[in-house]
Amino acid sequence: MQTDIDPRNLIGRKAFDRNGTKIGTIDEVYLDDATGVPEWAAIRTGLFSRDAFVPLEPSELVEGTLRIPFDRALIKDAPDFGVGRHLSPEQELQLYHHYGLDVTAPPPPPDHDFGKLAPTEPPNNNDPTTPHP
């Protein structure tokens, strides 16, 4: 999805599945904790006032509506965690699995103490500028 879209501008927009069938209206947008990028949307389906969580990537904003590249039945069967609360990493993982999306872990942070180069030559004990142990 376009990452330059203000998530507040998504709320209230209509959402459609891959076949153009209306799913509902965007109720809330959830941002990634680490990057602040919009990651999930809660779609008010109208079915028992239930919200269905959908991934914003690979969805697209087309002519003012959100186009979600999944079938309506799959979207409506998404896990329901309720709106207005933070999605835990475990809940996000359930959603990724539900939609069959890749959930590769981010690379580990670099270890700054690892890989320091050893001196290429042993210290010259006859050189007065070389410190001696």
Image (cartoon, rainbow, N blue to C red):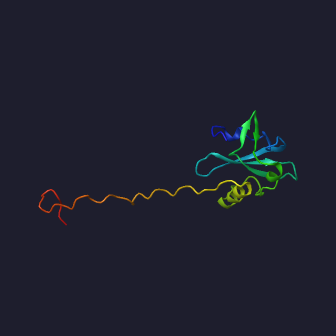
Report the side of 89 relative to 76 (left or right): left
Against 126, residue 56 (above or below) is above
How far across and down, in percent of the image, does residue 64 sit? Answer: 76, 34
Q: Residue at x 49, y 56 (%)?
A: 109
Residue situated furthest bottom in the rendering: 133
- Which residue: 83% across, 44% down? 24
Which residue is nearer to you in this view: 51 or 123?
123
Q: Where, quadrant-wise, is the N terminus in this rendering?
A: top right
Q: Position of residue 3 (x, y in %)?
A: 63, 40
Q: Is residue 32 left or right of residue 10?
A: left
| Residue 58 % position (x, y) | 69, 45
Query: Quadrant of the image for the C terminus?
Result: bottom left
User: What residue appears at the point 46 percent right and 56 percent down from the top-left corner?
Assistant: 110
Location of residue 91 with respect to 45 vertically, above or below: below
Give residue 65's position: percent from left, percent from top: 77, 37
Name, please, the residue furthest toward the top.
Answer: 63
Quadrant position of residue 16:
top right
Q: How many marks?
A: 0
Q: Indicate left or right for 96 with 14 as reference.
A: left
Determine which quarter of the picture holds residue 103: bottom right
